[in-house]
Image (tube, helix red, strand yellow):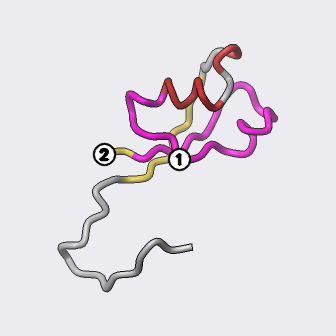
Amino acid sequence: MFYSLEKWTPLLRTGYHLVWLLCWGIPLHAWDLEDIRHIMTAVGEVVEVDDEMDELHRLDRAWILVKTP
């Protein structure tokens, strides 16, 4: 579950942030994970998408977890 475990210090920084983005208006022909990753390269690296988007329960919006620099 953990890659490493370190004692916290004020100098300890991750170097990135994880942010959930709510995306509207993605065209249906781009509604797969590879196209979503390509769209999100302007923001950061895609880490995860919500289950509703992944299982095609909702096609109007998607929650996407992005790792930003």
Residue 60's tag is none
Q: Position of residue 22 (x, y in %)?
A: 55, 36
Q: Nearer the viewer, residue 9 or 20?
A: 9
Q: Position of residue 14 (x, y in %)?
A: 31, 62
Q: Nearer the viewer, residue 29 or 4?
A: 4
Residue 17 lies in the magenta-colored region = no
Amino acid type of the residue tagged 2 in the rendering: Pro
Instruction: Say few, some or many: other residues with alpha carbon within 10 Å of mark 1 (under 14 / 14 to 19 / 20 or more).
Output: few
Amino acid type of the residue tagged 1 in the rendering: Val
Q: CA distance from mark 1 to mark 2?
A: 13 Å
Identify which residue is drawn at 60% across, 19% down: 25
Q: Position of residue 65 (x, y in %)?
A: 53, 46
* Magenta-highlighted residues: 40-67
The correct choice, above or below, for 47 with respect to 41 in the image is below
As drawn, the residue found furthest toward the left would be 11
Identify which residue is drawn at 42% across, 47% down: 67
Residue receiving disc 1? 47
Instruction: Say few, some or many: other residues with alpha carbon within 10 Å of mark 2 (under 14 / 14 to 19 / 20 or more).
Output: few
The correct choice, above or below, for 54 with respect to 30 in the image is below
Which callout, 1 or 2, points at the residue further toward the start of the chain?
1
- The quadrant where residue 69 appears: top left
Residue 69's tag is 2
Identify which residue is drawn at 31% across, 85% down: 7
